[in-house]
Image (cartoon, rainbow, N blue to C red):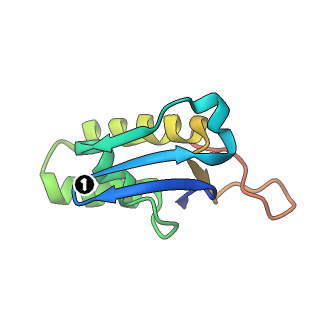
Amino acid sequence: MVRQASGLARLERPASVVLLNLPCIEEQQSPYVFEGPSFEIWTRIDGTRTEEHIVDELVEAYGAPREQIAHDVHEFLAELLRLGLIVDDDESDGEGEAAPHID
């Protein structure tokens, strides 16, 4: 399961979210703004859904080809993980801490 990382400051609107990764604010330099497809994926990252569940919901909601949605979701989640905005709880470092993962 994937969840949003702790330490994020956010401003949420009905169709967008603006994020600051406070633990990495010196490296970030500017806020991340998610709208459209990125917003739709972001709102589903809640610690209760896997990547596959997110893909299933988006396929059902938009009727786009599953392969395309799966690719886009995977790439976006990998970037969010790299930026420290999400955590993949399916991986653990043995001390109860989630470790980076997204194949």
- Give the residue at mark 1: 58
Q: Is residue 49 above or below residue 39?
A: below
* Residue 33 position by quadrant: top left
**Whole-percent x, y for residue 85 in the image:** 56, 46
Residue 70 visible to an observer of this rendering: no
Residue appearing at x 39%, y 47% in the figure? 18
**Whole-percent x, y for residue 72 in the image:** 34, 36
Residue farthest toward the left in the current orientation of the protein: 63
Image mark count? 1
Of residues 19 and 85, the one drawn nearer to the viewer in this rendering: 19
Residue farthest toward the bottom in the current orientation of the protein: 48
Residue appearing at x 52%, y 54% in the figure? 9
Residue farthest toward the right in the current orientation of the protein: 95
From the viewer's perspective, tell me whether residue 68 is left or right of residue 7: left
**Whole-percent x, y for residue 62 in the image:** 14, 52
From the viewer's perspective, tell me whether residue 6 is left or right of residue 48: right
Residue 71 visible to an observer of this rendering: yes
Of residues 22 and 86, the one drawn nearer to the viewer in this rendering: 22
> Which quarter of the rendering shows the N terminus?
bottom right
Residue appearing at x 22%, y 54% in the figure? 15
Q: Is residue 38 above or below residue 60?
A: above
Residue appearing at x 66%, y 39% in the figure? 24
Neighbour class for label 1 at 10 Å: few (<14), some, many (≥20)?
many
Amino acid at the residue labelled 1: Leu
* Residue 27 position by quadrant: top right
Look at the numbered disc 1 and give the secondary structure of its residue: helix
> Which quarter of the rendering shows the C terminus?
top right
